[in-house]
Image: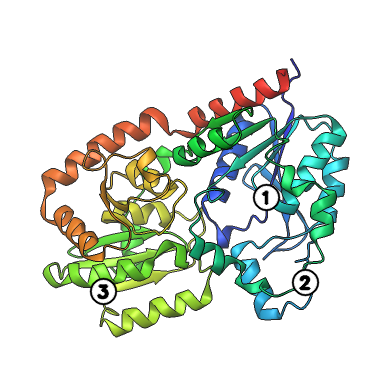
Amino acid sequence: MTELKKVIHVMRRFVPDKWGGTETVVFNLSRELIRQGAESKIFCTDMLSTSGPDHVEEVTVQRFRYVFPWFGLSKAEKEKLRLKGGSPLSLCLFLSLLKEKDVSLIHTHVQHRLGGMARTVAKLRGIPLVVEIHGGHFTLPAEQVEKMTEPFHGKLEWGKLFGFLFGARRVLADADAIICVGKNEFVQMKAHYPTQNVFHVPNGVNIDRFAHADSTNFRATYGYKPSEKIVLCVSRIDYQKNQLGLIRAFALFSDRHPDHRLVLIGAVTVAAYHAEVLAEIERLGLSAVVQIIPGLTPDDPLLPGAYQAAEQFVLPTHHEPFGIVILEAWAAGLPVVANRVGGIPGFATDRENIMMVEKDDEVALAQRMGELADDSVLRNRLVSAAREEVAATYAWPQVAARMREIYDGVLRD
């Protein structure tokens, strides 16, 4: 069997101030692989950053110049694509991936053109290709697709030639292993590619970081009194995450719970949506009790401190492939309310370790928040079950060990 020496992870971008679930997964997996003795590097575009090598703790990140391959994109449309990741083309990344020494396998976290480049390099070098689906391949709602592709509607896409040359549509079909983070997407992927090696590997969490954080500094930094109870939501400010629905639900909840405050933490990835959220806060007269904190980087100690400072965590998302923030809340000992969408029902059970509501039911969301606020016995029961679940299954060493088994399997085959 070929020894695992070096893994190259391919993704669109990797910048701490626009951090999302995929970045969390790739960073923690890379760091754990390094600690287990394998080299693990990240190749991405220099989107929202600068070209060249960088280090995030012990993980090496190499960023490359890129273009969005459509004619006629305006500056504003390019900025929208950057904030959402877009579908970039980077020949610099392709050439460097081809020349990188001692690569055992390529693990791509993106498809389209960048995934096609990873596929082509793997074929040329005779090494395995692992493709990870972080959600949305089968399950992304049509309205989300429409909003994501709006910047290049009606534009001539000159990059299609490169997509054809790199086999962008063959990425999954030619993969040596396909990994799905969500159980629902795993089931659909198995049905769609019955002869492929398809695996379900859930995301992980750094349990100690969230379980032993200090809430004092967070409360002091943002001026929260001990008597003020915090309802927390951590997710990028984006129409997919539905902070508008949470704000409307909080307005209903706040009538009977005036001592509670809503805290929204997350990078702004859709500026127009951020403006809508601010306007809705103002319209509902919630400016004194709702705060948006857009700038916490993933290594900021204030982030786990926010979880420890909160009474409950709420995730009102329209679409969620998995929901790493739920694991973070569980590790911190927080009861969680979340929409019954995407991959969440695949690892969480209503009224056992979480409270679930149907999508877009703001009244029910407010009611579940009220139940948690009013019932300490319910909160404690959910927290106890969630802590047991997260410790048994989702610690990063366990998740990385499962990934190593898959790597070893494709290297052996």
Which mark is on residue 232?
Answer: none
- Can residue 398 be spotted in the picture? yes
Q: How many marks?
A: 3
Left or right: 266 as drawn, with respect to 71: left
Q: Nearer the viewer, mark 3 or mark 1?
A: 1
Q: Residue at x 54, y 69 (%)?
A: 147
User: Is the residue marked by circle 1 packed among few (<14), some (14-19), or many (20+) residues within 10 Å?
Assistant: many
**In which quadrant will I find the N terminus?**
top right
Q: Position of residue 228 (x, y in %)?
A: 20, 65
Amino acid type at mark 3: Val
Mark 3 neighbour class, 10 Å CA radius: few under 14, some 14 to 19, many 20 or more: some
Q: Position of residue 12 (x, y in %)?
A: 68, 55
Q: Which residue is mark 1?
A: 11
Residue bearing mark 2: 156
Q: Residue at x 29, y 38 (%)?
A: 386
Amino acid type of the residue tagged 2 in the rendering: Leu
Please report contact status of discs 3 and 1: CB closer than 8 Å, yes or no: no
| Residue 227 coordinates in the image, percent (x, y) | 17, 64
Coordinates of residue 241 in the picture (x, y in percent) = 42, 62
Residue extending furthest toward the top: 1
Q: Secondary structure at mark 1?
A: loop
Compute the Cα span from label 3 to label 2. 46 Å
Per the model, the C-alpha gap separating discs 2 and 1 is 24 Å
